[in-house]
Image (cartoon, helix red, strand yellow):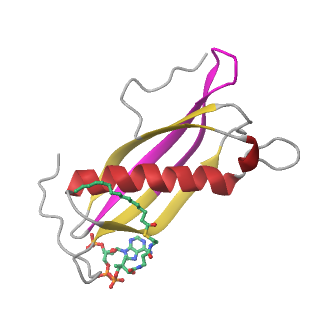
Amino acid sequence: MSQMPTAKPSLRTIAMPADANPDGDIFGGWIMSQMDLASGVFAAQEIKGRVVTVAVDAMTFHKPVYIGDDVSCYCRVVRYGNTSLVVLVETWVQRHHSEQVEKVTEGRFTFVAIDGEGRPRPLNIVEK
Ligand SMILES: CCCCCCCCCCCCCCCC(=O)SCCNC(=O)CCNC(=O)[C@H](O)C(C)(C)COP(=O)(O)OP(=O)(O)OC[C@H]1O[C@@H](n2cnc3c(N)ncnc32)[C@H](O)[C@@H]1OP(=O)(O)O
């Protein structure tokens, strides 16, 4: 059986009936939206300021998400640029009424740090 990452998730929620199609599969757009939110909060905390999403790459839906699944998004920085950073997001579920955990989705979200006028600003951080 797979094992969830041991780190704290950036976001944890339950997939609800309103997020599903008539066959009970959770919409990919809902999952992407959770991942955008998780990685956006993570990136904002990382650079201690405002960020905007500029690109989403390598989105892969490995397995379906079903109503009632316990959904967790795990984030880590994979690249720092001058004004941007790339966050790898892995989404895992614990199946409803089950011990089974699986990685369902992953993707790379690129954020740009912006100033008060919405212009890119340098990150000013030392790569970890
Ligand atoms: C204090 C802490 C509190 C924390 C508490 C949390 C608070 C709560 C947080 C909520 C977090 C919500 C997170 C969701 C955030 C949205 O959903 S935002 C909404 C969707 N996004 C947008 O509307 C962005 C629209 N786009 C823009 O405004 C402009 O294109 C941007 C992003 C400011 C960039 O402006 P630009 O003039 O094109 O910039 P440019 O100088 O060409 O490029 C800047 C950087 O972006 C990169 N870039 C540009 N285009 C691309 C591309 N297509 N692909 C990859 N990289 C690119 C460049 O390579 C460059 O990187 P660096 O080499 O500097 O590292």
Q: Is residue 33 above or below residue 117?
A: above
Single out the residue that lies furthest toward the right.
Answer: 23
Judging depth in this view, the residue of 14 and 46 nearest the camera is: 14
From the top left corner, tell me how far across and down residue 95 is, in percent: 67, 25
Question: What is the magenta segment's predominant secondary structure?
Answer: strand
Residue occupying image coordinates x 40% and y 40%: 10
Q: Which quadrant is home to the N terminus?
A: top right
Q: Picture quarter containing residue 67?
A: top right
Please name the residue shown 11% across and 54% down the image.
126
- Does residue 36 show up? yes
- Residue 97 magenta-highlighted: yes
Taking the image as shown, residue 54 lies to the left or right of residue 28, namely left
Residue 65 image position (x, y, % from top left): 70, 38
Numbered marks: total? 0
Q: Is 55 included in the stretch rendered in magenta?
A: no
Which stretch is magenta?
84-108
Residue 74 is situated, as x and y percent measured from the top left of the image, at: 43, 39
Q: Where does the image place residue 55, in percent across and percent down from the top left?
A: 46, 68
Going by the image, does 78 lie left or right of 27?
left
Identity of the residue drawn at 25% across and 84% down: 117
Decide: is 54 above or below 31.
below
Q: Judge by depth and name the residue closer to the eye, 112 or 30.
A: 30
Confirm whether residue 73 shows in the render. Answer: no
